[in-house]
């Protein structure tokens, strides 16, 4: 018996597995059904984008970096553009900044609704999955109408944006948001009252505020444990200073809180998009950018749907960057899985993993 | 230290506010830069890194955003202004050490970002692991190991995080002297074995 106890039983999951559409490999050490350890191996879709940026010019990199992730593509393009514009000393017109914010919040809506579906699916609640994905089509149609694309919207150019919002477009966006807001109210009710669903979320994957801070969590995952971290509030970028958002916090710290925080953030996104549409500043959409960027280093931080996205950009003064470091929110949040897995049932692992909204293509750059 | 750039001072300001990173890290600070609003670059010795991070975390100053590195190969002009680089040369370092690897630890507290920067000799780039203080630093350290060829002492898991298991030894893709031919003999079938 003693010897049996000392032997480790490892359950390998992935890289291809039924829980997630993207490849990642996990090894859970278990004692019976209880997890006693967890490790992660990434890199199955590593494309070497950081290295590739060193071989492309500043404009080409915008399109390359936008393709790091299919869900938060605008976040990557925006973080990069803001960094390069800061290095070049170019001030982007307020109308362009406001449009960037509108698209960023639309991206948050589509990302959170997509996540809601995936997470509901992990819990075996496929009706919620199909409803939320059906409603997500509303925002996808708005994005397609506005930008021409469902993913990789390609809204940013260095120095501004290339799409404009006229009165007619604004009306159709408002109509879509009204529908979504009504549906979101329903989802908030479902995830906080459905008995069966709550048994998969309430008290599962719990972290205290101190733990969440120590693990370095970011984004909604951190805010669900009452850690006040939101780049939109801490360091307002684009137009967040003129059109501020309120930070959504929850003291729960468990999976249920992560559902509640993300869904409540949607209301904040609807509100701020409407506000911007009403008061969209007039003016140009772009500023002229130099082909060579002044020598220097900068950091660019934005709040992607999953949390803080961090870019470190170094220019040697040429047509190409010296180095671009991309730190995506998921890499920080993976600490939640390895940090809180111990003591949980093996069957809770897919839910805990889905609860932090992992993005493997972001990690694997 | 004879060469100093205008934006580099070799010691911390004595009148820095109490509890600020500038004051907390004053005893290890070899140079300070303020490249942008809300940003503070503190140049330190790699040997003092753990002590600096300990002080920051004990004071609950912010959280670790990222660890990354820069290869300085072919950029002597930029680094000649750097007091730390000068010190490496003064210590009689070899030609190889004249293109050191710079390691950067980014910490954020609200809008403020503090970057601990240190130079490592290219041929024997070694740094201590941060995992004893911040366990999640392991992700970044594994990246430093495989991408830049930095030896991280005492890191709990030094295996590949992103690169394939059969990636050739001593080939570090984010170093500036990396050539794609170095991996051309590595077959895709081998990678997936």
Image: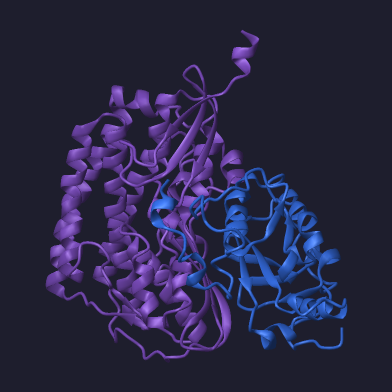
Chain colours: A purple, B blue
| Residue B56: quadrant of the picture | bottom right
Pinpoint residue A229: horizontal percent, then vertical percent: 52, 53
Q: Quadrant of the C terminus of chain B?
A: top left
Residue found at x 58% / y 83%:
A296
Pinpoint residue B176: horizontal percent, then vertical percent: 58, 75
Nearer to me, B132 or A160: B132
Q: Would residue B189 appear left or right of A161 to someone viewing this image?
A: right
Residue found at x 29% / y 86%:
A283
Q: Would residue B152 appear left or right of A17 to someone viewing this image?
A: right
Which residue ends up furthest to the top in the rendered image?
Answer: A1
Residue found at x 38% / y 39%:
A354
Q: Quadrant of the N terminus of chain B?
A: bottom right
Nearer to me, A31 or A359: A31
Q: Would residue A220 appear left or right of A283 to someone viewing this image?
A: right
Residue A242 seen in the figure: no
Q: Is residue B116 above or below residue A353?
A: below
Which residue ends up furthest to the front in the rendered image?
Answer: B185
| Residue A24: quadrant of the picture | top left
Residue A194 seen in the figure: yes
Pinpoint residue B147: horizontal percent, then vertical percent: 57, 62
Pinpoint residue A311: horizontal percent, then vertical percent: 50, 68
Count of marks, rendered view? 0
Nearer to me, B187 or A37: B187
Residue found at x 24% / y 42%:
A185
Q: Is residue B126 above or below residue B41?
A: above
Nearer to me, A347 or A79: A347
């Amino acid at each position: 018996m003693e010897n049996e106890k000392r032997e480790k039983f490892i359950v390998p999951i992935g890289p291809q597995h039924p829980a997630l559409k993207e490849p990642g490999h996990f090894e859970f050490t278990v004692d019976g059904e209880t997890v006693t350890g967890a490790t992660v191996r990434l890199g199955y879709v590593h494309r070497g984008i950081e290295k590739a940026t060193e071989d492309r010019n500043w404009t080409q990199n915008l399109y390359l970096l936008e393709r790091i992730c299919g869900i938060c593509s605008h976040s990557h393009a925006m973080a990069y553009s803001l960094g390069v514009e800061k290095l070049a000393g170019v001030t982007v017109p307020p109308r362009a900044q406001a449009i960037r914010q509108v698209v960023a919040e639309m991206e948050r809506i589509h990302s959170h609704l997509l996540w809601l579906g995936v997470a509901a699916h992990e819990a075996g609640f496929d009706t919620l999955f199909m409803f939320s994905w059906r409603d997500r089509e509303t925002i996808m149609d708005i994005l397609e109408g506005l930008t021409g694309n469902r993913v990789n919207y390609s809204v940013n150019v260095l120095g501004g944006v290339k799409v404009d919002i006229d009165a007619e477009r604004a009306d159709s966006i408002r109509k879509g948001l009204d529908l979504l807001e009504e549906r979101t109210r329903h989802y908030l009710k479902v995830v906080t009252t459905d008995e069966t669903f709550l048994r998969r979320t309430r008290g599962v994957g719990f972290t205290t505020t101190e733990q969440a801070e120590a693990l370095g969590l970011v984004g909604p995952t951190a805010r669900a444990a009452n850690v006040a971290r939101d780049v939109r509030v801490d360091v307002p970028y684009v137009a967040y200073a003129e059109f501020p958002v309120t930070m959504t916090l929850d003291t729960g710290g468990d999976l249920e809180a992560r559902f509640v925080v993300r869904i409540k953030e949607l209301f904040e996104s609807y509100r701020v998009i409407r506000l911007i549409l009403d008061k969209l500043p007039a003016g140009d959409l772009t500023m002229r950018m130099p082909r060579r960027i002044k020598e220097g280093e900068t950091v660019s931080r934005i709040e992607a749907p999953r949390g803080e996205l961090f870019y470190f950009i170094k220019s040697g003064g040429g047509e190409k960057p010296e180095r671009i470091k991309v730190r995506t929110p998921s890499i920080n949040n993976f600490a939640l899985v390895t940090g809180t897995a111990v003591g949980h049932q093996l069957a809770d692992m897919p839910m805990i993993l889905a609860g932090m909204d992992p993005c493997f293509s972001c990690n694997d750059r | 230290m004879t060469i100093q750039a205008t934006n580099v001072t070799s010691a911390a300001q004595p009148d820095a506010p109490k509890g600020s990173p500038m004051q907390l890290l004053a005893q290890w600070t070899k140079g300070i830069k303020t490249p942008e609003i809300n940003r503070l670059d503190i140049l330190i010795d790699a040997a003092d890194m753990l002590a600096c991070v300990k002080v920051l975390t004990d004071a609950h100053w912010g959280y670790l955003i990222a660890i990354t590195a820069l290869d300085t190969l072919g950029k002597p002009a930029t680094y000649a202004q750097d007091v730390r680089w000068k010190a490496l040369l003064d210590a009689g370092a070899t030609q190889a050490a004249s293109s050191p690897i710079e390691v950067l630890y980014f910490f954020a507290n609200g809008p403020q970002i503090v970057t601990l920067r240190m130079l490592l000799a290219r041929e024997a780039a070694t740094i201590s692991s941060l995992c004893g203080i911040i366990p999640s630093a392991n992700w970044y350290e594994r990246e430093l190991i495989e991408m830049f060829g930095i030896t991280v002492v005492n890191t709990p898991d030094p295996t590949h995080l992103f690169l394939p298991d059969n990636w050739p030894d001593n080939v570090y893709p984010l170093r500036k002297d990396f050539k794609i031919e170095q991996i051309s003999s590595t077959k895709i079938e081998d990678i997936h074995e």
